[in-house]
Amino acid sequence: MKKVSAIIIHEHGAAEKVARNKRVELAPPGPGEVRVLMLLAPIHPADINVLEGKYPVRPALPGVPGVEGVGVIEKTGQRVLLPYRFGSWREAGNAKEADLIAVPDGISDEQAAMLRINPATAFLMLRNFVKLEPGEWVVQNLASSAVGRCVIRIARHFGWRTVNVVRRAEIAEELKAEGADAVIVEGGDIAAATNGAPIRLALNAVGGDSAVRLGSVLAPGGTIVTYGAMARQPLRIPNGLLIFQDTAWRGFWVTRWYERATAAERAAVFAELFELVKNGVVSTPVEAVYPLEEISTALEHAQRSGRGGKVLLRGA
C-alpha cells in the first residue's frame, strides 16, 4: 500500500470547512486498472454544490470530490483525461484503463484539465439536438459562464450566430470580443437582436422566467435545451408553446452522455475537441493554481465573484 494526498469530505457543509487534505492509503491497481498521477484538476460550481450537499449526484462519504482533471499514467507517462467518477482532487488513484482518454501533444495541461465538462457540454448541445445550417442563430442565457463562452467560440467557428443573454450590461464587449454576435441584458428584446430571423435552438442554464423568454422566441418546432438551473426556479412551460409552437423542451447532462456513449462516440467527440483546443477555438482562462494542501484557500478563491478564470488544484 502507498500513502498519497487526497481531499476528503466526511460531511456536507460550507465547502472550505468540510474539505480536508489527508494522507490516505492507495492499493495497487486491480485487473484492467492503471495508476494515474493527477496533474491538474479544476474547481467547478458543481464541485462546490457537491461539497455543500446540493448536487443531485454525490460521492459516498467519506469521499474524494472533483469531476474532471488531467493526469499521467505512472508506468507509461501518457497524459490522460481523468474519468468522471475518479475523484480528481487527489495526488494519485487507480482507474480503469478503458475509461481514460489519451491527451495528444500540443495541448497544455491546463486546457486538458478543463476539457471534459464545459467545452464538451457546449459542443454536444450545439451538435446533438438541432442540425444547424451555416448562419443560423442560437440563443442562450447565462452567456458569460464557462459553458456560455464555449458556446460562443464554438458556434462562431462553425459559422453559427449567437444571441447571448447576460445579467450585466458591462460584460457585453468582452463577449463580443470572444465572438458573440449579439449581447442583451436579461429581459431585453431577443427577436430584435436577430432582426426577426428564426431561431431553432435555445440553451438554458437559468430556469424560471428566463427559460420562458428563450422558449418564446423560438421558431415553430424549435428546441430549448436545459443544462442548468442557476435561478433555482422550476421550468414553467406555457401551454401555448407546446400546442401552437410545438416547442421541444429537452434536458442535457454531460455525465449521462458519457455513460451512454460508446467508446467510439467518445473518441470521435474528443478528437474534435482536441483540434478545437489546438486551433485556439476552445481556451479557458486560468486565474490561479493551488497545491492540495491549500484546499481551503483554493475553494474560497473559486467562490469569489468577478473572477477572470478558473481555479485549479495541482497534484503530482
Image (tube, helix red, strand yellow):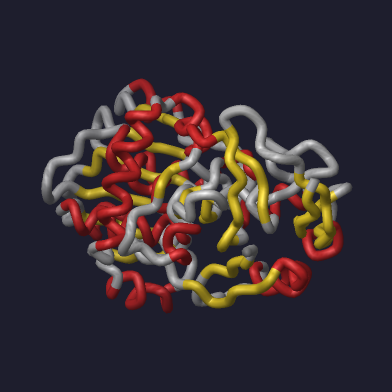
Q: Nearer the viewer, residue 141 or 227?
A: 227
Residue farthest along the front direction in this orientation: 75
Is 97 on the left or on the right of 179, as rendered? right
On the question of residue 193 being in view, the answer is: yes
Residue shown at 21% from the left, 58% from the top? 156
On the question of residue 216 being in view, the answer is: no
- In the rendered image, residue 6, in percent from the top left (x then y), is placed at 76, 56
Q: Classify residue 298 by image quadrant.
A: bottom right
Residue 28, placed above or below residue 43: above
Q: Nearer the viewer, residue 47 or 250?
A: 47
Residue 306, placed above or below residue 18: below
Residue shown at 26% from the left, 54% from the top? 275
- In the rendered image, residue 183, in percent from the top left (x then y), is placed at 32, 65
Residue 147, placed above or below residue 248: below
* Quarter occupied by the C terminus: bottom right
Q: Classify residue 45 by image quadrant.
A: bottom right
- In the rendered image, residue 238, in percent from the top left (x then y), is placed at 46, 31
* Quarter occupied by the N terminus: top right
Residue shown at 36% from the left, 76% from the top? 174
Residue shown at 42% from the left, 63% from the top? 111
Q: Nearer the viewer, residue 205 or 79?
A: 79
Q: Nearer the viewer, residue 313 or 234?
A: 313
Residue farthest along the left direction in this orientation: 134
Is 214 on the left or on the right of 314, as rendered? left
